[in-house]
Amino acid sequence: MNHALSLLSALVLIPACSGPERSSSAAPRPKATLYEHATIRVGAPDWRTVDALLVQDGRVVAVGTHAELVEAARGLEVEHVDLGGRFVVPGLHDAHGHLQGYGDTLEIVDLRGAASLDEVIARVVARAANVPDGEWVRGRGWDQNLWESKAFPNHAALSAATPRHPVLLERVDGHAALVNARALGLAGLDGDLRGRDRLQGGEVLLDADGRATGVLIDTATGLVERVIPPPTLDEQWARVERAANALVAQGLTSVHDMGVTPELAARFVDRPLALRAFVYVWGNEGLEAAIRPRRHATAARANELVGAKLMIDGALGSRGAALLEDYSDAPGQRGHLLVPEARLRELVLRCAEAGLQPAVHAIGDHGNRAVLDAFAEVAARRPEFARLRPRVEHAQIVSAADWSRFEALGAIPSMQPTHATSDMPWAEARIGAARLAGAYAWRRLPGARTPLAFGSDFPVESPNPFEGLYAAITRTDARGEPVGGWLADQKLSPGEALDAFTRGAAYAVHREHELGQLAPGFLADFVVLDVDPLTATPETLRATRVLATIVGGECVFGALESRCVDR
């Protein structure tokens, strides 16, 4: 039997092979499963290979040669799974994503890649034609940096094309939105808005007559979102489940979900998903509610509330990231802080007192410095603070004076490789050549106790981890440009990049003792691939196919789902 046929046959044998549907008549789980005839990468740092893996009760029992594991399994009832020479790596983490947000994008208008405002409007009009008059039309993913003008849009053309529906369209980064006239009216943002009180951490862009252009920055989007009927908790959870089922097909076994409500967090800790979720509850407001509910994950696929997501600034693409000096392409503008620095220190301290790991969004060099200053002040008051492993989410633009502070403070840089390759066409225009030295600096920030934790920030970027690995290794776009890579001194080796998606991400949630590697006692999270990500060419790596995803010893995605035994 050739390798492809033996793999497909083997997938039929994997216990509890997937599909979103669950069967109540699943066969009893065998006492042990021996995965054999594969190239199995055990994990960082050396990424050594073995050809067999023995799993029992959701955990790895042993790794080694086929002969060694047959001997180790002596006396057990063993299911043999022939992987047909394919490749296995530890389960991949996305260390920064948004499950409900990704589930939303599977339902709303997808605006990613739209090359002009006209294309955005055409996609919205097509959706509005199937929506009853008066109901909201929502979309996400527009990026004015892809358009010829590069300027923020005005709502006039959108409003003329959608007179019967209120419309809200989030920018690709989630830190700005374009709304139409009907939405502005419902939110009380029509008429002359000059003289209104200034928002903390946001802005309603105005034209020369003082009227809203339709673009809302950061907290200003809340002025419209508050008049949109919110989804029920059941609807939110359905989107989370849909997202999880889609993500395991891309090889993800764990997601660090950044910023959920306390009510939704309660669903996470009570209900399993196709993958394991480490939940960070939204903490800029209502942090006290974030302290409950909490539970350490003990079951094979239990979810866990581990921390609080805080935010200090906006995004670079919408000029909301807080900078120490002016934007190079917008003199006089330095972005904005979403909360005052004193308030951020209070929030971080409250996290420390509650034992919640703080994970703070910081994009600009001012934002990053404010976060590091807050960590330093809290650490001085509470010496045990470093044991929480505080995280800086994104850490995109960091001043040279602050590079070493990450390791000194034990602050984990939680970064997203595809942000660099998405932003590189316009990042220099935003911040100038000098500040690029601290931009997307994957080699400058990590240290011995602050390893990189990589993710994608989905749905801002694609959740496909192989696109992230490609970006980390090449620092080029899908066409291989620029030749040699953008800011090439920050490129990572394949092993270093894969480490950040496995062991480094597991460390970021205090689970390096049982996730991120395939070693005895570790949870049996792994993916079966058609290529070896450590030896594949970058182009081949980017096109990697996931053939099976196993979480806690259960197959949650497989190449022949319809022929797998249902759970």
Image (tube, rainbow, N blue to C red):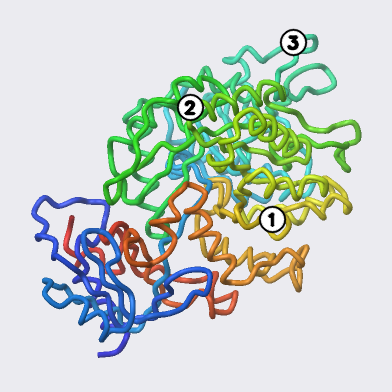
Crowd around label 1: few <14 · some 14–19 · many ≥20 (10 Å): many
- Residue 11, given in percent of the width and then of the height, sits at 25, 72
- Residue 158, given in percent of the width and then of the height, sits at 64, 32
Q: Give the label on residue 48, or none.
A: none
Determine the residue positioned at 37% across, 79% down. 86
User: In the rendered image, which quarter contains the N terminus?
Assistant: bottom left
Q: Quadrant of residue 154?
A: top right
Check disc 1 and report its element: helix, strand or loop: helix
Closest to the observer, 297 or 429: 297
Q: Amino acid at mark 2?
A: Ala
Q: Amino acid at mark 1?
A: Ala
Closest to the observer, 189 or 27: 27
Asked whether residue 255 appears in the rendered view, the answer is yes
**Are the residues tagged 3 and 2 within 8 Å (C-beta)?**
no
Q: Amino acid at mark 3?
A: Asp
User: In the rendered image, which quarter contains the C terminus?
Assistant: bottom left
| Residue 200 falls left or right of residue 40 | right
Q: Which residue is mark 2?
A: 354
Q: Which residue is mark 3?
A: 197
Crowd around label 3: few <14 · some 14–19 · many ≥20 (10 Å): few
Q: How many discs appear?
A: 3
Crowd around label 2: few <14 · some 14–19 · many ≥20 (10 Å): some
- Disc 3 versus disc 2: distance between alpha carbons? 35 Å
Please say if 472 is above or below 37.
Answer: above
| Residue 566 falls left or right of residue 549 | left
Determine the residue positioned at 46% across, 78% down. 48
- Disc 1 versus disc 2: distance between alpha carbons? 34 Å
Q: Which residue is mark 1?
A: 420
- Residue 188, given in percent of the width and then of the height, sits at 63, 12
